[in-house]
Structures are given as C-alpha cells and as structure tokens.
Amino acid sequence: MKDLSRRSFLKGAAGALGMAAIAATGVSAIAEEKGTYTPGTYTATATGIGDGIVTVTMTFDAESITDVVVDTSTQTAGYGLEKSGDFKEAIMAAQSADIDTITGVTVTSTAVKTAAAACIAQARGEAVEVAPVVEAAAEEEEISDDWLGEAPVFDTIDETVDVDVVVVGAGLSGLAAARAAAEAGAKVAVIEKSASFNVRSGEFALLNGPLNERWGRTGIVDTDVAVNRLMRECTYRNKRQILRNWAVHGWEAMDWWLQAKPDLKICDTTREVVTQEEWDNGILVPLAWPQPEHYDYTQEDFPTFPSSMEFRSSRSDQQGFMAEANIKMAEDAGAEFHYGCFGEKLLQDETGAVTGIIVREASNGNRIVQYNAKSVILATGDNSGDERIMKHFAPEIVEKKIMNMGAMGMLGVDVEGNPISRGDGLRLGAWIGAKVQDFHAPMTHHMGSGMGVTPFLQINQRGERFMNECIPGQQLENQIELQPNQTTFQIYDSSWPEQIPYMPANHGGLCYIIPEDEDESNPNYTDRQYTKVSAKANSYKYTGETIDELLTNMGFEGDAFETAKASIERYNELCRNGYDEDFGKPAGRMFAIENGPFYACEWGTTSMLVCVGGLESDENCHTFTGTAENPTRDLIKGLYVCGNVQGSRYAVEYPICFRGISHSLCVYYGWIAGQNAAKGV
Ligand SMILES: Cc1cc2nc3c(=O)[nH]c(=O)nc-3n(C[C@H](O)[C@H](O)[C@H](O)COP(=O)(O)OP(=O)(O)OC[C@H]3O[C@@H](n4cnc5c(N)ncnc54)[C@H](O)[C@@H]3O)c2cc1C
C-alpha cells in the first residue's frame, strides 16, 4: 500500500505538529523586557485544534502591550473556543506571551502563546515566519512502515537513582499505580513527560459496592452477563479474566480512590441541585439516574447498563480535583513526581527481568538519569498520536481520515509540544521483546449532532435507509463509515418532544425532557441526555414545512430525491404496522415522520478519543514476551502495565454497554499494578 502523506493523517493534528515546528524556528522564544516596541498593531496566527487557526492581534506603545484581541472561534467548545477573554486577560496582566497554559486547553493555549510571541517579535522588529513552517512540515514526511524503530543508545549517564518502583506516566492509571505502590511501602518515582498530570472528562463505570447500594443499583446486572456482553463487543479477542476481576472487585478500587477526597459531594440523582461552592470543589453523580420511565435495559438488544457515574466540576479537566487529591495521598505516602521527564529505555538483567529505566530530564537540560528499580510500571497511555503505530495497528482510522483527538493533542501535550499519546510504552516494551496485542480498539463512539444519537430515522446521500438506528454510538459509527461519503441524515418531525421519553438511555442520546420553567442556575443543570424543548428548537441543519421542501433543502434531487421520499414513506408504513421488518428497530421507537415542520441533522464520521491496544497482559498487569511470528508468551519479570498501554483488555471495538469503562479499568488496574509491583509478584 502506498504510504499516506503525513498531512492526511494530521488532518486534525496540524496543531501539535505546527506548534512543534514553530517552536523549532525560535519564534516562540519569549522576550521579557519592556520598552523596545515599535508602536502599532500586529497580528499573528498559529494552528490550534484541528486545522483551526487561532489569531492574536496585539497593540503596542513604545513601552507596553496596550490591547490584545484573541480569536479562538475555530476551536472546539470546551477546549478553547470560549477562552479568548481569559487569554487576553492573562497576556495583558503578564505583558508577555509567557502565560500559564489553561488546564485541559493545552493545544489552544500553546497556539495562543505562539501567536502572541510572534506579535511581540514583530513589534520588536524581528522577522517572523509562522504559517509557512506549518505547511512545509506537514507536506514533508511520509508515514514509515517501521513503527518500532531502534531503541536509543545512551553513552553517558549523568546520575543513577535507586528506587523500588518507577511509574512511567502520570495519567489516571499512573496516579492510581503510584499511590497504591507507595502505600504498599515502596519507594516510588513517577516519571511524567508533561509539565503536569493528565486527566480529562469524568465518566466511570461501576458495578456493585457501597456507592451502588446508596444509589439503589445493587445487583443491576449479573456479573457474568456483564462480562460476556463486554467480551462479545470486543469479538472475544480480549481476556475475560481481566474484565471479570474488574467487574467483581472494581468497586474496591473506587472506594479507595474516593478516600482521597472525604469532602466530595455525592449526589443522589444525575442533576441534583448543588451550590457553586460544591461545583467548584467537585461532585460525583450517578448517570441516567433515575432511569427514564420507559427504558428497561433488561429488554434491550443493545443495553446501556445503568451502572455509570461521573465526576463533575467547574474545572476544564473535570475530574482533575480527584487526580490532585490522589497525588497528595501518593506524595504523603512518599511517592516523588518528576515532570518534564521522558522514560526512554528499559533496562534488563541477563535473565531478561526489567531492572529499571533510563530517563531523559527534558526540563533539566536533558540530563540522563538511570533509575534502578525492582519494578517498572508502564502507564504511558495510548497510541493515537503516533501515525506509524496507528497505520500498523488501526489502519482504518488513518485511511478513513477519522478525526483523531490524541493526534490533536487533546489528551495533553508534553513539554516539547508533542501530543502525549505517542505509544512510548508500546515501544519501550517491544524493544525488550514484550508482545504487542493484535486488533487495537479505536474509541469512536458517535455522539450524534444537535439531537445526539437519538434513534430517529436515518438515510444516506442516496436517500436510502440503511440501518437499525437504535444501536449504540460505537456501532453507529461503523454503519456511517459504510455509507457514501461517510455522510448520513437524521430526520425527525415536530412531534419529537413526545418521542424523546421513549428513547434509550444510552451514551449520547436524548431521553429526558425537562419542564420549560425549570431553574437553570443549578451548576449541575447540564447533562446531554436531558433537554428543555426550547433548547433543541434550532438543533437541525435543514428544515421544511413539507417532506418535499425538507429534502430539497437538504440538497436531494433526481433519483436520490425520489429514493429519499420513498424511504420516508416506507418508514412511515413500518411505523404504522408496528414492526420494522426491514432493519429490526424496536417498535417502541418507530415514530412516523408526518407532522410538519420537518427537520434533519447531517452526520459525518465521529472523532476518535483514544485508540486502545497495548502490551499483552493479564489480570495481574504482567507483560509477556513474543511477536506475532513467535508468540512465546513468557512472563517478563519486573515489568507491569496499566491504563491504555495494558493490552488484552479490549480488542477491535471499544465496548460501550458500560459508559466510562476506560477510566474504571485505569483506576482498578493502576491499583493492582501498584500493589503487585511493590510486592514484586
Ligand atoms: C476528550 C476525551 C474524553 C474522554 N472521556 C472519557 C470518559 O468520560 N470516560 C472514560 O472512561 N474514558 C474517557 N476517555 C478516555 C480516557 O480518558 C482514557 O482512555 C484514559 O484516561 C487513559 O488513561 P491512561 O492513564 O491510560 O493514559 P493517559 O491519560 O494518556 O496518561 C498517560 C500519561 O503518560 C505520560 N507518558 C507517556 N509516555 C511517557 C514517557 N515516555 N515518559 C513519561 N511520561 C510518559 C503522558 O504524558 C500521560 O500523562 C476520554 C478521552 C478523551 C480524549
């Protein structure tokens, strides 16, 4: 297969690459002293999230920055779009481009800082070249087939440090591992290549345990039923014992995680009213709770089990307050965190056991430090930010140009400006002979558009209905990828408010209608499954008083128009018959499209959040030797994995019947890895 150009892979990743390229030219070097400006107004741009250009315009007098305009309108909601005022304030206060990165908005922050630095350089009369650098770098490289490359060689070691356990990566799983190992009495060093820890969002799956008892969710699903469902969604290429141990014991790890935050406000319902102070401090809510009156997950072909919860707060990294509380517990137990440091190469003795890791301290002049340790835990996250690994283990994401959040730096950026999720752990392991799992699982659950993944009628650009619309987001994405131009239309009529309460309580669908007069001042008001009718009144892309007018406005003409019209008529006939003999959609969700005005939303493919596939592992977080050709699978002593670099948890598909299972497995297996690494078992 011909190599894809780097540019096409980086459709969404130009931000991170562009910023790295700009930094390399020295444009982002930030001068601090005042009084050297040529008065005037200067503008510069840098690439932020996706291909989105961030523009900064700054006005100077001879002494100072007198005004700043930051345009982040191309950025993503929740990831920089609404932060232009904060950036302006920070630049004005600092009188410099050297402002703090806004937590969780790393890519946009770096773009703003880069563009602001370029404005300052212009005001100082320095030559600035920004956009061409991005373009040139993006065009240059092709994706190599050699995803592994050679392990680096270190001739000089600047310092040697002895510890019991090294944890590589301060993401969710690494934080759990560090705290667990330190509490088990080990001397722990955490090596993290970003300037801080990295967490995001906040949904967690949870079965059994006191929290579920409190919420009245005990015994919501039999453990074996749950685990079998997860195994089926992953096409039975993952390891059942890994999922079963989490299903039985996961709540123990969650109770332990919560001990770090005794003042946490735990709500009894999804949208319980909380105070601003509680919201700022962080809250925990059960999701889709109480369940919608008409949703019975036990009767669903594709159930979403009501067993999930979410940490929420006013912070942009949402669950960051829990991460900080657990870091404090880890530090109190003696763990030391080293930020801006890259784990570069595992060390082994003559038997093959791992005995430590070589670390490059990028934040300290690239000093090379050898950590000798009884155990090393890799908690380095996923591989979405590395195009070679993606092309090798999940080529469909590259070929179909699925927007890739990891490559865009939305999981975080390291101190050198690169996305954190570059598969370092996969390489570190594979260089010493650890077996990489087959069939990596892209997390590509579609979240729909304005009306969410709510299962209204869908047709494709040829006007054909093509699926049972009542399937979860991950499966929806698969179906959309099969359609012409990977484009579909979700069609509904003006009776939608009466239909919503009958829709499934799944991930990303609307299923609750809130009274119009409900007070919106509750900070915990927003939840994407709940809506006032007025809030969704304009969520459509196309509308029409008649079906003909709607289809015309959607761009249908000729045969496609006739096909679309016939598809709607056929759908209405099936709705009236109460049986979807074409695609098997549940009758209770078949609502005829007959009450104008009519509406349509347009869907493309979704974004990939992470791509999950790591080093083959087991329920004890061990790693094993082997290659596809020679799968020896001998245990590698001293090397443990948790989080997304722990392979064998998922395969092919990310399972979506439990919302937030990724975070849950991170904490549970971080906890296990930490304990086992401390004991050396
Ligand atoms: C926008 C978004 C929302 C999401 N929401 C949810 C959700 O609600 N529920 C859910 O379950 N999942 C969610 N996910 C997925 C989930 O966040 C991740 O799967 C999970 O948190 C990964 O945790 P981790 O510890 O494995 O890795 P990461 O969080 O990626 O952390 C890995 C850490 O290792 C560091 N690192 C990597 N290599 C090195 C090295 N060589 N040296 C030193 N440090 C290194 C990285 O800098 C990073 O800090 C979401 C993902 C995204 C992008």
Image: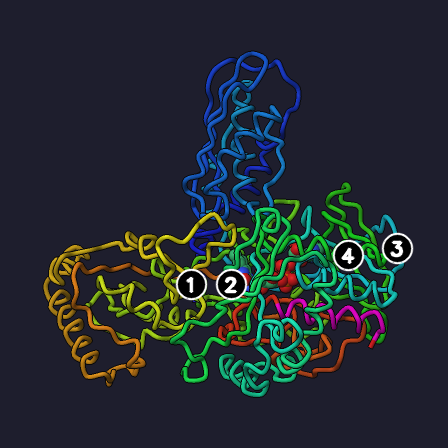
Q: Which residue is mark 4?
A: 190
Marks 4 and 1 sit apart, C-alpha to C-alpha, by 38 Å
Return the mark for residue 161: 3
Residue 209, disc: none
Q: Secondary structure at mark 1?
A: loop
Front in this rendered view, residue 58 or 626: 58
Amino acid type indicated by mark 4: Val
Residue drawn 43% across the image and 50% down it: 519
Q: Is residue 665 magenta?
A: yes
Circle 3 packing at 10 Å, graded few (<14), some (14-19), many (20+), is few
Q: Nearer the viewer, mark 3 or mark 1?
A: 1
Where does residue 428 sit, x and y in percent of width and height?
Answer: 70, 64
Q: Nearer the viewer, residue 650 or 636?
A: 650
For the N terminus, which image quadrant?
bottom left
Would residue 5 be found to the left or right of residue 243 on screen? left
Q: Callout 1, which amino acid?
A: Gln
Say which residue label 1 marks.
Answer: 529
Whether the residues at callouts 1 and 2 have beta carbons within 8 Å, the answer is yes
Let me know if residue 388 appears in the view.
no
Disc 1 crowd, CA 10 A, few/some/many (<14, 14-19, 20+): many
Query: Bounds of the magenta span?
Result: 664-680
- For ligand 1, tell me if the residue under mark 2 lies within 8 Å: no
